[in-house]
Image (cartoon, helix red, strand yellow):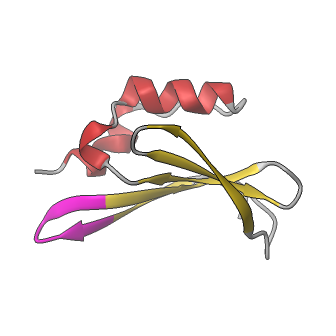
C-alpha cells in the first residue's frame, strides 16, 4: 500500500473505532504495539517502522492531537476534513 487511509467502524451510526493505515509493503504485519495517547495505539512492523494507528476512542481524538502524533512519527499531517468520519454523531 503506497498511500495512507482512514477506516472507521460504526455501530448504530456512531464511530466506535478507527484505523489509520500507513504506507507499508505487502505482507507487513504488526509485531508490537505502542500506546502513545489515550485512545491511540501505534502498530509497529518487523522493521521497526509504524504501519498503522489504532484509534480506540474516536470521541477523544482531535485533529491537532492526531497531527502531533503523525509529526512525531515523521509523517505528513492530515487536513481536519480527513478526520471528519471520526466526528459523525
Residue 64 horizontal/vertical position (percent) = 41, 23
Q: Is residue 1 above or below residue 41?
A: below
Give the magenta part as a residue range: 9-16
Majority secondary structure of magenta residues: strand
Q: Quadrant of residue 59?
A: top left
Q: In this orientation, which residue lies closer to the viewer: 48 or 28?
A: 48
- The residue most toward the right is 47
Q: In this orientation, which residue lies closer to the viewer: 28 or 41?
A: 41
Name which residue lies at 36% across and 31% down. Answer: 80
Is residue 6 in the magenta section?
Answer: no
Q: Is residue 45 above or below residue 53?
A: below
**Residue 22 appears in the figure:** no
Q: Is residue 77 above or below residue 57?
A: above
Q: Quadrant of residue 21?
A: bottom right
Horizontal side of 26 relative to 33 (left or right) equals right
Q: In this orientation, which residue lies closer to the viewer: 34 or 63?
A: 34
Residue 33 horizontal/vertical position (percent) = 65, 54
Horizontal side of 49 relative to 70 (left or right) equals right
Amino acid at each position: 500500500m503506497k498511500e495512507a487511509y482512514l477506516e472507521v467502524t460504526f455501530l448504530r451510526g456512531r464511530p466506535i473505532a478507527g484505523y489509520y493505515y500507513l504506507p507499508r509493503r505487502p505482507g507487513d504485519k504488526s509485531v508490537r504495539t505502542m500506546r502513545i495517547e489515550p485512545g491511540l495505539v501505534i502498530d509497529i512492523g518487523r522493521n521497526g517502522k509504524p504501519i498503522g494507528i489504532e484509534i480506540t476512542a474516536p470521541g477523544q481524538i482531535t485533529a491537532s492531537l492526531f497531527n502531533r502524533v503523525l509529526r512525531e512519527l515523521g509523517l505528513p499531517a492530515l487536513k481536519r476534513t480527513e478526520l471528519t468520519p471520526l466526528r459523525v454523531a
